[in-house]
Image (cartoon, rainbow, N blue to C red):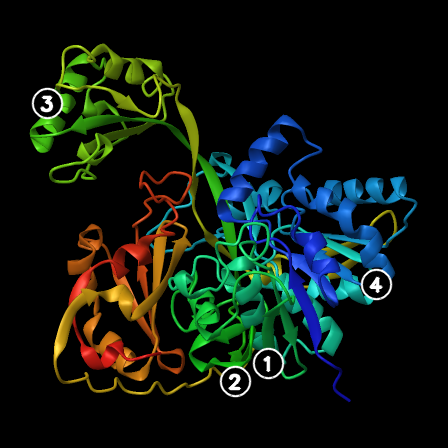
Amino acid sequence: MPKDPIRIANCSGFFGDRPSAALEMVNGGPIDILSGDWLAELTMLILSRIKNKNPQSGYARTFVTQMNDVMETCLEKGIKVVSNAGGLNPKACAEAIKEIAEKRGLSPSIAYINGDDLMARLPELIDTESLLPFEAEQKLGDASDYVTANAYLGCWGIVEALQTGADIVITGRVTDAAVVCGPAAWHHNWKKTDFHQLAGAVIAGHVIECGTQATGGNYSFFNEIEGRNNVGTSARFGFPWAEIAYDGSCIIGKHEGTGGIVNKETIISQLLYEISGPEYLGPDVTARFDTVTVNEIDKDRVQISGTQGQAPPKTLKVAMNKHGGYRNSFNVALTGLDIEEKAQFAQAAFWDACPTSPSDFDSVNSKLIRTEKMDPATQEEATAIWQLTVKDKDERKVGRAFSDAMIHTALASIPGMYSIGGGPSKASPFGVYQPALIPTGLVPQYVHILNEETFLVEAENLTGTPLTIESSPSPRMPIGPTVDIPIGEIVGTRSGDKGGDANLGLYARNKNGWAWLDNAITIERLRELLPETENLQIERYRFPKIMAINFLIHGLLEEGVAASSRQDPQAKALGEWLRAKILPIPTAAKQEK
């Protein structure tokens, strides 16, 4: 007999999200599970630095603070907690939770899951070629180069922990969706081969993993959200929950009386976030995003259904970070007339003063950022920026000797010379993200009931016939009169980072808009619209059921967010840049959504 749906709430979309979210979700309405995502590729690098200073750290302490706020209420209401805040030290995180429980006179059953951290095994895994490059042309190099190496685990360790009666489950590096998929699989008693149901839960987890990005945050059409500017009330967007049914379908919503909006477009936006093609690979299932159907069923209630899944790949993704070297940068204001000539002069004066020539650095990135306006009303409107960023493995090259050289030119360079962002600075270390693959069978999960038993969850290679999904053909381009308008008047976007690559998802608001989008925005047109992508490899994928396309732009973010020299190192606003571009668009595509 199928059970009732399980309502799984999110209270964190990243390490540093709103601290009060856990309390809001526990007290704001009925939920069965409190979950959240604290980990990202950059977060693992940050946690490694924290752990190097204190071996008993390496986890998200903000989660511990949140649990201090809600633990008692969760136990009273029977709300289970599933969190990946354990980071690089799930055991220490579990012990910190136990400490605050004891201070409150509480005795929850606490489980932590590890097995994802491969650092101790890395030399052997590389030497035996058990660890494989994510891209064929990549080389893994020496194990000593890396500071973190964590396999993305799936949901079955979480299922085991909940089956033992754990009230609080703390993991290390699991997939973002696993903290949702695990409780759903446990509640509905799914088997490991229930691929369609698991895929549905993965989709639900993908949608709510980034918190308020599902409830109106980062939403292209934010100006349609009622009450968004009401400070003290609806300006604070509610966090989302997913109510997952036995068949894997779900309803996404938020608590009554909270700010924001849950509609078809906020959900489609988040579906497009940080994906590539229709096959969304994971350790438990390969979810087919090209089978998903999204429908509004009520105010702030959206149903996701029809999701199909197939067997997962025989490898797990491994998130690895290595020390990339040191970096430094500065910004020089270029004001008024002759901006390009001023940039050239400022650059020549600097390199004449710098004790190191450009060819002696590992990397030099010089940018002229044209932010000035004609006939400026303010000095700020008259100002462009020359930005210089250097990287090198030698900290001394990119340290004060580099930044001091800019100051040395202050009286012997361009007219109106001044720097933006402070004076000379020291070099700062940066990390390089490099993913890898490892055979699934080499990475079991270990479920520890704190101070009690340990359970081994063996990894399995699951098989099945790949799905054949027929994609509908492109609709005919709308005919009739056109008008030159920004793309964003008819198209919404969501963009983000995937290591050194960027994803750029676009969706239409109506059928005519979809017909235009599907025909007009090709890879070639994208290169024209965003010149930064001109020489990069780009992949394009169609999702007709949600009237969307996704571009995967390789190398846009260089070596990943921690090393990128882009002003927007995670490509968060890449989509908004595209929406500002003007094209001739059929008036038929401008009709109401």
Q: CA distance from mark 1 to mark 2?
A: 7 Å
Cβ–Cβ under 8 Å for marks 1 and 2: yes
Q: CA distance from mark 4 to mark 2?
A: 32 Å
**Label 1 CA crowd tier, 10 Å (few <14, some 14–19, many 20+):** many
Q: From this viewpoint, is residue 459 visible? A: no
- Amino acid type, residue under disc 3 in the picture: Phe
Q: CA distance from mark 4 to mark 1?
A: 25 Å
Which dot, 4 or 3, sits closer to the camera? Answer: 4
Cβ–Cβ under 8 Å for marks 3 and 2: no
Cβ–Cβ under 8 Å for marks 4 and 1: no
Judge whether 166 appears above or below 344 on screen. below
The percent position of residue 43, horizontal first and vertical second, equals 54, 43
**Label 2 CA crowd tier, 10 Å (few <14, some 14–19, many 20+):** many
- Which residue in the structure is indicated by mark 1? 249
User: SS at mark 3?
Assistant: helix
- Which residue in the structure is indicated by mark 2? 306
Which dot, 4 or 2, sits closer to the camera? Answer: 4
User: SS at mark 2?
Assistant: loop
- Write the residue at 33% across / 80% down: 510
- Amino acid type, residue under disc 2 in the picture: Gly
- Which residue in the structure is indicated by mark 4? 77
- Which residue in the structure is indicated by mark 3? 345
Judge whether 572 appears above or below 274 on screen. above
Q: Is residue 461 left or right of residue 280?
A: right
- Amino acid type, residue under disc 1 in the picture: Ser
